[in-house]
Amino acid sequence: MTGDRRSGWILAVITGIVFVLLYGPIFVPIISSFFAVKMGAVDWQQPSVDAYIKLVENEGILIAVRNTLIVGASAVVCALALGTAAALYYHSGRSRDRAFLQLLIFLPFLMPPIITGLSLLIFFREIDFDRSLVTVIIGHTVFILALVFRTILVRLEALSASMFEASYDLGASGWQTFRYVILPNLASAMAGAGILAFALSFDETMITLLVTGSDNTLPIRLWAMMRLGFTPDINALVAIILALTTILCLMVARYLMPRASQRHAD
């Protein structure tokens, strides 16, 4: 019994150390956002919200955040539409080129981002397509499509074929079967895939750096600021993004939780 208790304490200590190493750096800018920085040192004696006020006044950062949200949302919508269509086509099993389709979707995701970004850059130059947020959206869509495709395909393969057969036997058309049978069963998988895809898009830097134009996203803006150092309002931005991300994850987890589990929790 003493040995089990000692093992439990050792595992608890190791878990605590890992937790501090992984999440400790995240809380440093959050705590620093409430204190002024003078002469390169944090003044712990006078808490304030000046960093948040300066963040609201920082037009460059706000524009970068807006561009990032536009790119992420647009790429997720495009990836969900293309990924769902590709998953349905692959799941139908009526074509011999399914393996090639899967290779085509996964190749940009498996290759190093610099290769994917460089390939897209050469492609846009060859077709004389000016770089802008549109090219960034295309690049992010190509990158996150594999994640969306695989997530939705796994859910499709888990569905019983009798559901589709029953729908057709009752006289439903292909569109009605998709709308009233397939789509409701894919809703949670699409939501989960959309959240993960948005997180990848929000953080993507290398592909964005190669295909972006004059409009910068937040990762590119922060990468450019590394040479001169970060201003205190960046700490406020990190705190806000972390808070919003946590709230979003809790809301989605609550929404995706089975109803039976919800009643048990209530």
Image (spheres, grey):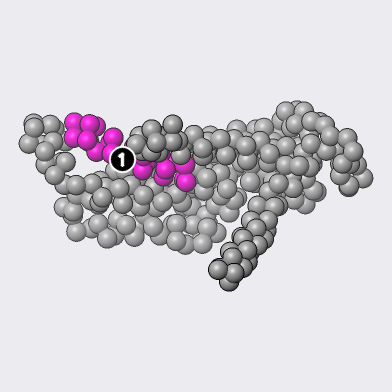
**Which residue type carries mark 1?**
Leu
Please count the marks in the image: 1
Secondary structure beneath label 1 = helix
Closest to the observer, 80 or 30: 30
Image quarter hosting the C terminus:
top left
65 on left or right of 225: left
Please give the name of the residue rendered at 75% of the width and 31% of the height, measured from the top-left corner. 52
What secondary structure characterizes most of the magenta part? helix
Q: Quadrant of residue 83?
A: top left
In this picture, residue 46 sits left or right of residue 171:
right
- Residue 101: x, y in percent? 30, 55
Out of 48 and 122, give the one closest to the viewer.
48
Identify the magenta region. 175-197
Residue 44 picture location, percent across and down: 87, 41
Q: Is residue 8 above or below residue 199?
A: below
* Viewer-side residue, 137 vs 120: 137
Image quadrant where residue 242 sits: top right
Q: Residue at x 79, y 48 (%)?
A: 229
**Residue furthest out toward the right:** 39
Image location (x, y in percent) of residue 218: 64, 41
Question: Residue 40 placed where, x, y %?
Answer: 88, 47
Which residue does the numbered mark 1 point to in the structure image? 186
Q: Which residue is drawn at 58% across and 54% down?
A: 206
